[in-house]
Amino acid sequence: MKLLLTLSIPVVAAIPFTVVGGDDVKGSTRPNRYGQPGPPGLMVVSDFEGASVADVSIDQVARSVSFMPGGNPARGWPCWWYFRIDGVSPGETITLKLRGSTATVGKQKPLAASWATPKQATWSVDGETWRHTDDGQRQAEWMIYSLKPDATSIFVAWGPPYTPGTAANFMRAIGEASPHAEATELCRSREGRSVPMLHVSEGDRTAEQRFGVWVQARQHAWESGSSWVAQGFAEWIVSDDPDAAWLRQHAEIFIVPVMDVDNTASGNGGKNSLPHDHNRDWSSNPHWNEVQAAQRMVSNLIDEGRMDVFLDLHNPAPGDPSFFYILPQEMLKEPMISLRNRFIDLAYARISRIKPLIPMSNKPKVTGAGYHPLWRQISSNWVCMNGNPHTVSLCLETIWNYRNSTTEGYRAVGANLAAAVREYLAEQPARE
Ligand SMILES: [Zn+2]
C-alpha cells in the first residue's frame, strides 16, 4: 500500500474520507486514554484510493467493527468495501460485522446483501499480499468474520483490491522488465484520471502482419478479481514460456486492467451506475471516455481485418462458477460460431484444470435480447456484431465467492486464458 500512497495520479474527485474510532469515538471504551492498561482504540481509516465503508460502529471492548459497504448507488451497486483498521494489538482477535448496504437510488430496493458478503473476507497486513479469513458466520442480517493478525494495522476488503494505482505500478514494472511491453495510457477518464494500458509486441512483423488481441477488465468497478485475471494474462504474455514468445511475435496485444478508473478509485461499485455502466455503453455515442477510446482502437483493428480475439473480464453472481457469456448462435454467422466454440473449448480445457481448483462451467450463458434491454451495447456483443467475420469476442466471468478466488487463483486464470489465445491463434492462417 506504500506504493499507492505515493501515486502521482491526480485526484480530482473527492475521495470519501473516514476516520472513525481511536480516541475520538464517542461512547467507546478507551482504556489507554486514562493511562490504564488495555488495548489501544481500534480506528477505521478509508482515506485512500479504492476505499469504501459506511455506517461504522466500533466496540472497543469486544474488539469488533460493524459496517456496511460505502459507495453512492448512483455510481453503481454498493457492494464493494475496503478499509484499514489501525490500533490492533498483534495477536488479538478482531471481529468484522458486515451487513448489506441500505443505500438506494430513488424507489429501488437496496441491493441484495449476497453481493457484498463473500463466504470469506480478504485481508492484508501490507496491502500487497492478500489472504482469506475463515468462513464467515451468518447471524440475522450480519455476516461475521474473525481474524487474528500479527500486526498493528490491517487492510480488509470484499476481495483482493486492484486500483488504478495497482495497474499503473504493475505496468511500469512490467514495461521496465520486458523489452516487448510498453506501459501506456488508453485515455483520461471523465474525472481526469489516467487509464493505464499495456501494449505488447515483439520482433519485426508489421502491425498488419499481426493478430489483434484486446483484453479489458473492470467495466464494473467492484469486480476486482477480473483485474487480477488481466494481470495474470499480462504476466504470462511477457514470460519466458516459448508459447508466450510465439504470441508476442505473431500478435499485437492490448491489455486494460481497469476500465472504470473513476469508480474504482473512489470505491464505488460501478455496475448499473447512471446513466448506464461501462458495459452498457458500447453504442455509436459512448458516454464514458474509456469506452470511446477502447471502441476507437478496437474499430481500427476491425478496419484492418485483424480483430481476432476480444476478451472482456468480469466477476459473476455470488453462486456462479466461472463461465463465458455469448450471443445466441442464431444471431451470428459462420465462421464466427465455430471459431468462438473452438476458443471456448481450448480455454475451458485449460482453466478447468487449474490446481488448486477454479470451478468452471463448460456451458456458456447467453446475453441476447432477453438478458438486458441494452444488450446491443454490451462490449463483447458490440464487438461480435461489428467485428470481422472471424472475430472471437467473449465475456469471461471468473468465480469470486470461492476459497481459491485469490490473487494466485485469478492470475492462474489469466495465464491459462492467455495460453489458450496462443493455442487458438496458432491454428489460424498466418497473417501476411
Ligand atoms: Zn460485470
Image: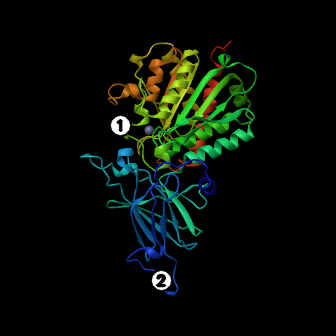
Mark number for residue 275? 1
Ligand 1 found in image quarter: top left
Residue at horizontal 69 percent and vertical 22 percent from the top: 250
Q: What amino acid does circle 2 point to?
A: Pro
Residue 240 location (% of width, % of height): 75, 35
Residue 236 falls in image quadrant = top right
Mark drawn on residue 31? 2
Q: Residue at x 61, y 44 (%)?
A: 168
CA distance separating discs 2 and 1 = 49 Å
Q: Return the residue nearer the eye: 149 or 125.
A: 125
For marks 2 and 1, the one nearer the N-term is 2
The answer to which of 409 and 275 lies nearer the viewer is 275
Amino acid on which the number 1 mark rests in the picture: Pro
In the shown orientation, is residue 189 left or right of residue 199?
A: left
Q: Is residue 115 above or below residue 84?
A: above
Circle on res. 429: none
Report the quarter where the C terminus lies. top right
Q: Quadrant of the N terminus?
A: bottom right
**Residue at the outermost left position:** 107
Give SS at disc 2. Answer: helix
Tell me if 67 is positioned left or right of 248 in this view: left
Residue 390 point in image, percent of width and height: 54, 16
Label 1, secondary structure: give it. loop
